[in-house]
């Protein structure tokens, strides 16, 4: 599946409001690992992420800072009716989904 935008927001804020928003994101990551967005959206962040900081001079008067982090979500396990039956003599391990 190609990249798909889930949420995007752009606005002009004060430096103080920006700092408060970054602290809010940090608190969400530290508390339960979920980032909340929009009216009712949330995304769970993996325990290990790849992160990138880019500071770029766009022109003589404009500077941009981009903070990006990404992770791979675990692949889903097959449904119970899709699991192959073990051949005789093999033991089948029980898989319990994580909460």
Image: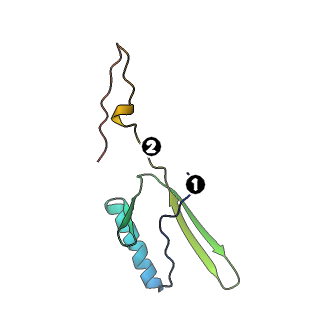
x and y, in percent, of residue 68 in the image: 53, 64
Label of residue 75 in the image:
2
Which residue bears the numbered disc 1?
2
Residue farthest toward the right in the current orientation of the protein = 60
Q: In front here: 43 or 20?
A: 43
Q: Which residue lies at the image location 47% right of the left edge and 85% below the top edge?
A: 13
- Disc 2 + disc 1, Cβ < 8 Å: no
Q: In front here: 76 or 30?
A: 76
Residue farthest toward the front in the current orientation of the protein = 81
Residue farthest toward the top in the current orientation of the protein = 89
2 up-or-down from 60: above or below = above
Q: Which residue lies at the image location 42% right of the left edge and 83% below the top edge?
A: 17
x and y, in percent, of residue 8 in the image: 50, 71
69 up-or-down from 63: above or below = above
Other-residue count near label 2 (Cα within 10 Å), few / some / many at <14 / 14–19 / ≥20: few
Q: Determine whether the residue tagged by mark 2 lies in a helix, strand or loop.
A: loop
């Amino acid at each position: 599946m190609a990249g798909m935008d889930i949420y995007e927001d752009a606005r002009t804020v004060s430096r103080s409001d920006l700092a408060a928003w970054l602290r809010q994101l940090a608190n969400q990551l530290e508390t339960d690992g979920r980032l909340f967005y929009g009216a009712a959206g949330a995304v769970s962040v993996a325990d290990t992420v790849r992160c990138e900081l880019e500071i770029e001079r766009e022109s003589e008067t404009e500077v941009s800072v981009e903070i990006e982090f990404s992770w791979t979500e675990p692949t889903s396990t097959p449904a119970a009716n899709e699991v192959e039956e073990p051949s005789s003599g093999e033991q089948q391990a029980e898989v319990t989904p994580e909460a």
